[in-house]
Image (spheres, rainbow, N blue to C red):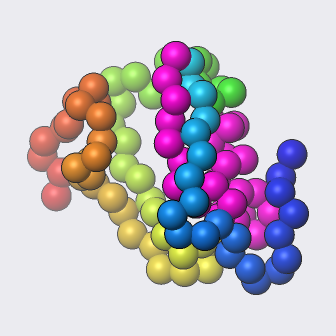
Amino acid sequence: MPAEAPTGVQAGAPGERTEVRAGDRLVAVSRPGKVLFPDDAITKRDLAEYYAAVADVMVAHLAGRPIAMERFPDGLGGQRFYQKKLGPSAPGRYPVMLGWR
């Protein structure tokens, strides 16, 4: 169930962390109270828990496909960018596709 958040408020203090179980792994989620979809009050924790719940089906469809991630660090109303490279903290189990321009 989505967390309640007042309109215009980005909940989730910097430094706040939680973990979400995804299969046999615990995945760290920073700022879990941050509201990602304000119209529906869906938080980062809500989205992580949803992804964990559908991971078995979703991963089967994504395996072997290149993925580019469009990021909205300050929410949907803020500036956005495409992340084309894995960050330094990304697990080494993901293959990297060369040739992106």
Which quarter shows the C terminus?
Answer: bottom left
Which residue: 57% across, 26% down? 22
Relative to residue 14, is residue 91 depicted above or below?
above
Relative to residue 30, is residue 76 depicted above or below?
below
| Residue 49 shown left or right of residue 17 in the figure | right
Q: Which one is in front, 71 or 48?
A: 48
Which residue: 56% across, 52% down? 17
Instruction: Give, as a single range, the part of the protein colored magenta.
Output: 24-51
Report if residue 72 is visible in the image.
Answer: no
Provide residue 54's location: percent of width, then percent of height: 65, 27
Which residue: 83% across, 52% down? 2
Provide residue 34's location: percent of width, then percent of height: 65, 64
Relative to residue 49, is residue 33 depicted above or below?
below
Which residue: 19% across, 38% down? 97
| Residue 2 shown left or right of residue 73 in the figure | right
Residue 33 belongs to magenta span: yes
Relative to residue 44, is residue 94 depicted above or below?
above
Q: Which one is in front, 7 or 97?
A: 7
Report if residue 18 is visible in the image.
Answer: yes
How many tags in the picture?
0
Q: Quadrant of residue 56?
A: top right
